[in-house]
Amino acid sequence: MKQVIWSAAVLSMCVPAFALAQAETPRIDQRQANQERRIDQGIASGQLNEREANRLNNQQEHINNMEDKAKSDGVVTKKERARVKHAQDRTSRHIARQKHDRQQR
């Protein structure tokens, strides 16, 4: 009987850890970091003016909020990952367009 209770206690401690492990999103986090670095490089080089940089940073913040909302229940579903990836794709295109337009500081 002691062994059954002990096993149940250990299992109940592992379930929340398993749920948190599924909520990890290293690819999303790495891509966010890369895009933020691209924005910072554009500011430093003068390819992005202040208004463009603010708009792109707001888009990045929106994606971070989407990711936080997806993680809130402990599991990020395929649909949630696809939605975040789509938003990252869109922001990536915006970064590229704004960095390569003829507008200067």
Image (cartoon, helix red, strand yellow):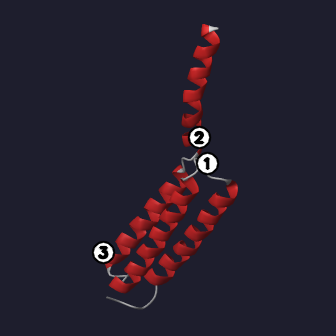
Q: CA distance from mark 3 to mark 2?
A: 40 Å
What kind of residue is marked 3?
Answer: Ala
Q: Position of residue 58 (x, y in %)?
A: 43, 75
Q: Which residue is mark 2?
A: 19
Compared to residue 21, the image places residue 4 above or below, namely: above
Q: Position of residue 4 (x, y in %)?
A: 64, 13
Count every numbered label the image shows and give the total.
3
- Looking at the rendered structure, which numbered label has been put on residue 84? none
In the rendered image, the residue lying farthest to the right is 79
Labels 1 and 2 touching (C-beta < 8 A): yes
Q: Which residue is mark 1?
A: 75
Q: Earlier in the sequence, mark 1 or mark 3?
A: 3
Q: CA distance from mark 1 to mark 3?
A: 37 Å
**Placement of the N terminus among the 4 image quadrants:** top right
Say which element carries label 3: helix
The residue carrying pointer 3 sits among few (fewer than 14), some (14 to 19) or many (20 or more) residues within 10 Å by Cα, namely: few
Compared to residue 56, the image places residue 66 above or below, namely: above
Residue at image position (58%, 70%) is 87
Say which element carries label 2: helix
Q: Earlier in the sequence, mark 1 or mark 2?
A: 2
Q: Tell us which disc is closer to us: 1 or 3.
A: 1
What kind of residue is marked 1?
Answer: Val
What kind of residue is marked 2?
Answer: Ala
- Which of the 4 image quarters holds residue 103? bottom left
- Looking at the rendered structure, which numbered label has been put on residue 44? 3
The residue carrying pointer 1 sits among few (fewer than 14), some (14 to 19) or many (20 or more) residues within 10 Å by Cα, namely: some
